[in-house]
Amino acid sequence: MDQINMQPLDNKSEGFAKKENGYLLISALILGLLFDFLFYGKPLGLSYPLYIIALYSFLFWNMRNNQQGQFNRKLLLGIPIIALSFTYLIYSNWIFTVLNFFIIPILLVAHTLLLTSNNRHEWFKSQFLMEIIHGIVARPLANCLKPFYVISKFAQGRANLRKLGVAGKVLAGLLIAVALLIVIVPLLASADDIFRQLVERIPNVFRGISFGEFVPRLMIVAAVTCLIFSYLWSLFNSKAKSKEAVSASDSLTNTRVFLDPITVSTMLVLIDLLYAFFIAIQFSYLFGSLKYGLPQNFTYAQYARKGFFELVVITFINLIIVLGNMNCIKLSGGRLDNAVKILNTVLVVSTFIILLSAHFRMSLYEEVYGFTYLRVLTHAFMGYLFVLFIVTLCKIWRKTVPLLKAYIVISLVAYTLLNYINVDSIIVKNNIDRYNKGNPIDILYLTRLSYDVVPKLADFANSVSDQVLAGQLEKGLTYKKQALEKEDHWQSFNISRYRAKRALAH
């Protein structure tokens, strides 16, 4: 990766560079203070999207005079980032809370690299992943001492204050004094109890400040400020020195060709015949099970569980086969090429039916054992694979389709949508429907889900006649009510917890 230059850019005057670096430092400091204000000692909630919006606001502000600001379609990546950040406000699903904690920063680094044109490689190339890793690890650390360099340069230019009017000099003095007082007053209060008591009597100004925790909070603000400044400074003061030429072709198509079309055709014929036989069995037993019955000594659950994961593995194998022979085959330009396309199409269509079989098996399994995270997410994953194969089918007949680009975009959109379908609510709704049809229900499992399920469980509690079940449900909801009674800061406001608290208040 490129080395970060510690000197101002050649195409800027030194004075202008100082001013821009000063703006950058002020932005980083505000973001550092905001980080402490929103996150220190508080659960994530409303604070997360507020911080992401503030981060983007300061980024665009510092890009206002920069030619790097020609973003156009690059802005689109900000949509899933902001959408994912709002899940911390809307939902309380702990699985996506943890996943998004890692995914959002990765997407944020990728987006800022693209917006500021600091990427050497195109976003759909595998090398871009290394640039993201470099952006996460190296860029925040490479110039973490740079803020002190900027401050020293500003101090060297203090003689320029003589050029300011009286009002300007007074304002500069006030700003410097306030910055010093923010540090000095708490330190003095921590050192002397009498002084601390006097300070605490000042109405509102220092109310709520715990001087015992001031030092670690100050360290957090300083660390976040330096890391953010280092990262932003590296974006605005370094450029990718040898960016790859933009190519309209997909990187997968650059794979070395070595497969003979006759060999590929022979392989595909045998595989397609095998799948045709398998699909015939699926239609006779599984898809027609309600009419003709299952094989002897098999129940729905046994039959579903026995083959589901094997079918998912087969789906992946088929995807590898199609991608491999599409990108590694020697094209002859004749009828043989069309025959390979037809055979690949048959393989993809067979995979669609196999996915449908896997979906149907999992549905049968859920009818017997109920709905869980793994089972619902498995359905979503099969839908995701189905869309990938549709794009792959387009690629078979139209070579210009940018397959890897499409895969990345589909994956990002699918993950964002998955955050918003409210998996917990789906699990509870379907399990309650099963119970109303006479099936058993695992209340202990349902009450361990996130606060998203509390309103539905509270309504369900009013209609349960089974005393044992009602007792389990009441115990689970009481536990959640006790957890919700803990006082939260407004920064941690979460719609899911708010709705749960209201549902339990009645």
Image (cartoon, grey):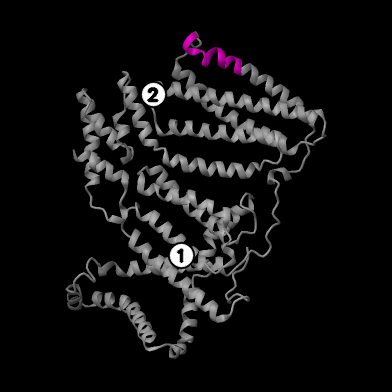
Q: Dot 1: what SS? A: helix
Looking at the image, is 278 positioned above or below residue 105? above
Give percent across and percent down for residue 459: 25, 31
Let me know if residue 431 appears in the view. yes
- Say whether residue 245 is left or right of residue 471: right
Q: Nearer the viewer, residue 66 or 438?
A: 66
Looking at the image, is 271 positioned above or below residue 253? above
**Number of other residues with Cα within 10 Å of mark 1, as a class: few under 14, some 14 to 19, many 20 or more:** some
**Number of other residues with Cα within 10 Å of mark 2, as a class: few under 14, some 14 to 19, many 20 or more:** some
Q: Main secondary structure of the magenta part?
A: helix
Q: Nearer the viewer, residue 95 or 75?
A: 75
Looking at the image, is 494 positioned above or below residue 504? below
Q: Which residue is drawn at 55% across and 26% down?
A: 355
Give percent across and percent down for residue 102: 46, 51
Q: Which residue is drawn at 53% across and 59% down?
A: 112
- Say whether residue 468 is left or right of residue 274: left
Mark toward the start of the polypeptide (1 vs 2): 1
Give percent across and percent down for residue 387: 57, 34
Q: In which quarter of the image is residue 184?
A: bottom left
Magenta segment range? 279-291
- Image quarter where the C terminus lies is top left
Where is mark 2, residue-wise? 369
Q: Quadrant of residue 158?
A: bottom left
- Image quarter where the N terminus lies is bottom right
Say what amino acid the circle numbered 1 marks: Phe
Where is mark 1, residue-wise? 58
